[in-house]
Image: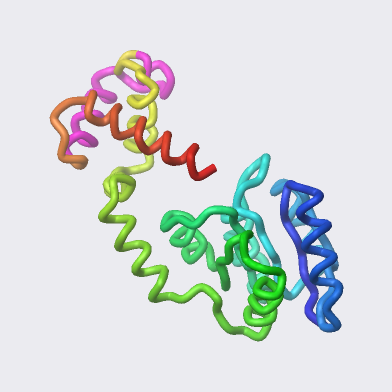
Amino acid sequence: MIRIFLLDDHEVVRQGVRAALEAEDDMTVVGESGDAAHALDVVRRCEPDVAVLDVRLGDGNGIDVCREITSDFPSVKSLILTSFDSDRALVDAGLAGAAGFVLKQIRSAQLIEAIRTVASGRQVLDDAEVRMAMRRLRDSEEGRLFDLTPQEQRIFGYIGDGMTNRQIAAEMYLAEKTVKNYVSNLLAKLGMSRRTEAAALSARLEERKHHDD
């Protein structure tokens, strides 16, 4: 019997998936959660074989939960379930240790087969596919941010919000001169000469993110 944990913030979706899975003779749903905050506690109590995790949650995302499950419960196989197909989500799922990545649009029979596959120890998420997605992502506009440090990425986001160096310095408790140096470094890494170019790139990436959501 394959023991399954479901994570999705839409109760109707969870009910539908649970009904489809429990109609199978070799599957049972032993736990579920509607938010990321309680997911790990439920997994700890119900000890599933497979965790089916939605990417988009009201209080977080399934990729982060997958990463925590991989770290704390290595015997649990995670299957990422998402409503959109993107290289970013695919790469993040692979790096988080997911055994599979499937779209919500697939038929119930395909989801059931994917669960059986990862439960048996095989992968639905192909390593070569992840590497190809990572290569495409690095060649994209979003990939240009990979070389930025976490601090520089944060400042890049503030530039996109239209904040001045002085405002960023106050927000991050840094000297204005320090922020200016960070801005110069991140512009150089992005191959840009003006912060307006960085602001335009940030706006495009944010718009794309909302479109994916």
Residue 174 magenta-drawn? yes
Residue 170 is one of the magenta-drawn residues: yes
Q: Is residue 50 above or below residue 62?
A: below
Asked if 128 appears above or below 165 in the picture, the reply is below
Quadrant housing the N terminus: bottom right
Q: Residue at x 35, y 22 (%)?
A: 174
Instruction: Please name the residue shown 55% across and 79% down the image.
Output: 123
Identify the residue at horizontal 33%, vertical 32% (top origin).
156
Q: Which residues are magenta?
A: 167-188
Residue found 41% across the figure and 24% down from its top: 172
Percent from the top left, x then y, of residue 57?
66, 45
- Number of marks: 0
Image location (x, y in percent) of residue 32 = 80, 58
Question: Magenta span: helix, strand or loop, mainly?
Answer: helix
Colouring method of the image: rainbow
Q: Nearer the viewer, residue 176 or 79?
A: 79
Quadrant where the C terminus sits is top right
- The correct choice, above or below, for 85 with respect to 144 in the image is below
Q: Is residue 207 above or below residue 128?
A: above
The spot of residue 55 in percent (x, y) is: 60, 53
The quarter of the picture where residue 148 lies is top left
Find residue 210 and report its horizontal and vertical position in percent.
49, 37
In this rendering, would 195 be left or right of 78? left
